[in-house]
Image (tube, rainbow, N blue to C red):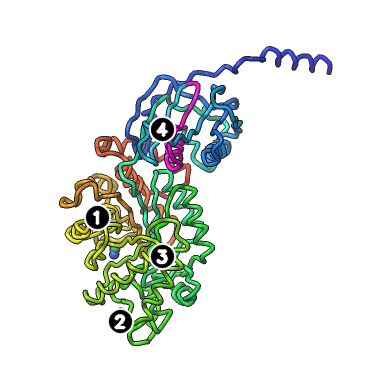
Amino acid sequence: MKNHISYIVILLYLCVGCTPEKAQISIPVAARSLIPYPNEVIPADQGFLIDANTTIYAGTNLESQAIAQQFSSRFTKASGITLVSVNESKLATNSIHFVLDSAAKEITNDEGYLLKITPDRMIVRAKAMPGLYMGLQTLFQLLPDEIEPDAMHTDIVWGVPGVTINDAPQYAYRGAMLDVARHFFSVKDVKRYIDLIASYKINKLHLHLTDDQGWRIEIKSWPKLTEIGGTSAVGGDQGGFYTQAEYRDIVAYAKLHHITIIPEIDMPGHTNAALASYPALNCDGIARPLYTGMKVGFSTLCVDKELTYKFLDDVIRELASLTDGDYIHLGGDESHVTSKQDYNVFLTKAQAIVKKYGKNVMGWEDIQSAGISDETIIQHWTNADIATLGAKQGASVVLSPAPKTYLDMKYSKDTKIGLTWAGVTPIDNAYAWNPASLLKDVPASQIIGIESPLWTETVVDMEAIEYLAFPRLIGHAELGWTQEKNRSWESYLKRLKSHQNRLKIRKVNYYQSPLLE
Ligand code: ACM
């Protein structure tokens, strides 16, 4: 026993003042698949090795500490190694730094970041939290694939390529849309979608909360919307809805991932679920039957009734109180049984109500006919001329051209789920277009981003969501983030091919396109 103790003392003595030897590591940055591809990537010879002696430093800012914590906990889960958190940056070699520096001049954008990896340190620097979060996503992509949740791998060398990355997004709005009205998806499913899209720096999740087939958000002042209108879904499948507490939970979860939820109440058409719940909302005072088919364009709120605007006011007031972002989406598409004049009267009033509750209006391009302000975002989906008329009124434009971005379009004629009304959209077709030149008469400065809608008439579960969204949504994320000069189908395809392994590790039910072989 005595001998044993002195042996330990000698070892400690030998190590006083020494830094544990680190193996050198050299991994080409091209060996990692960065998607979306950053603005500037400058490779260096020697990379960084994370080992049991690596420390992590995030300064005194609680928010950057939270980012460091996200890194540590994912790393520990994947590796079994616990990283020691330190509070003194300058001393530590073999350390990982998350630095929030609001004065950083070289970073021009709140979502921008600088990432520098040398043998001694890995530093992620940003001027605002969104940037630090985006840098964290890139850092995860620079680690071995096994950093992807959810298994532990104790046999991995946790090497990171030497590199300097200076990055910022091309567009501020990088969105996905999930239709939870045609089929309902649980809070758990929505959170899984958030987890997945956040990895690709998508920062908006538009939830299509109401449609003919279902009303999915609790409105306390109009409880039958969910008691009745929440019970149906396409094909007679099970309905459902989010309580306000559940919805707040989704909003908070999204916020942790630097994603803003944009809620849509589609109106004055696409409202059968509301018209089935409250007879008085119909012009004839007769409730409509619940609808489980797939037709569009047959329903409308009653534009002449005062009650319609009381209803709208209550719905928007409650929804605004649940919304942390600036925008509420009013839909406005395919109101085929509302007269043009009624449509414009209705949307003028609806827009005023959104403003009254402190939010700005987003809507499908169709809403431009009512007159829109330059604070409005219109979402282009089918008619370039109509979207251009909206842009001429000063509105910002989000691009969701159906043949390119509608994730419910089939990959090929043989795809089992999905629709084909806008064509079939293989993965190269989804990627190979340029947002800046899609609408030729709209100045590039008014295009604020792109969004990939997933309509769910034929989509019944999370597996189907993943099948249609992945990998096309990953390509859209690159279109939204990466500058045109850094994009090419060949480069993207190469990266996506090796990125598949991460999708497999995360058990994403993605479409294994023949193009990926
Ligand atoms: C839409 O696809 N009706 C916006």
Residue 232 percent coordinates (x, y): 43, 73
Q: Residues within 10 Å of mark 1 (few under 14, many from 20)?
A: some
Residue type at the position of mark 4: Ala
For the question of whether residue 459 can be seen, the reply is: no
Q: Which residues make up the magenta segment?
A: 119-143
| Left or right: 394 as drawn, with respect to 45 | left
Residue type highlighted by circle 1: Pro
Q: CA distance from mark 2 to mark 3?
A: 22 Å
Q: Residue 269's quadrant in the figure?
A: bottom left
| Of residues 349 and 418, the one drawn nearer to the viewer in this rendering | 349
Q: Quadrant of ligand 1?
A: bottom left
- In space, the residues marked 2 and 4 are separated at their CA atoms by 55 Å
Residue 127 on the magenta span: yes
Of the numbered discs 2 and 4, the one sitting upstream in the chain is 4
Q: Could you say which quadrant of the image residue 177 lies in?
A: bottom left
Q: Which residue is mark 2?
A: 304
Side of 128 relative to 96 (left or right): left
Mark 4 = which residue?
104
> Where is 84 relative to 353, above or below?
above
- Looking at marks 2 and 1 on the same chain, the residue that comes earlier in the sequence is marked by 2
- Whichever of callouts 3 and 4 sits on the residue coming sooner in the sequence is 4
**Residue 382 is a magenta residue:** no
| Residue that mark 3 sits on | 357
Q: Which residue is mark 1?
A: 403
Instruction: Kindly tell me whether mark 4's CB lies below 8 Å from ligand 1.
Output: no
| Of callouts 2 and 3, the N-terminal one | 2
- What's the residue type where badge 2 is placed? Asp
Determine whether label 3 and label 1 are within 8 Å by CB. no
Task: Give the residue furthest to the right.
Answer: 2
Distance between the alpha carbons at the discs numbered 3 and 1? 35 Å
Q: Contact (CB < 8 A) between labels 2 and 1?
A: no
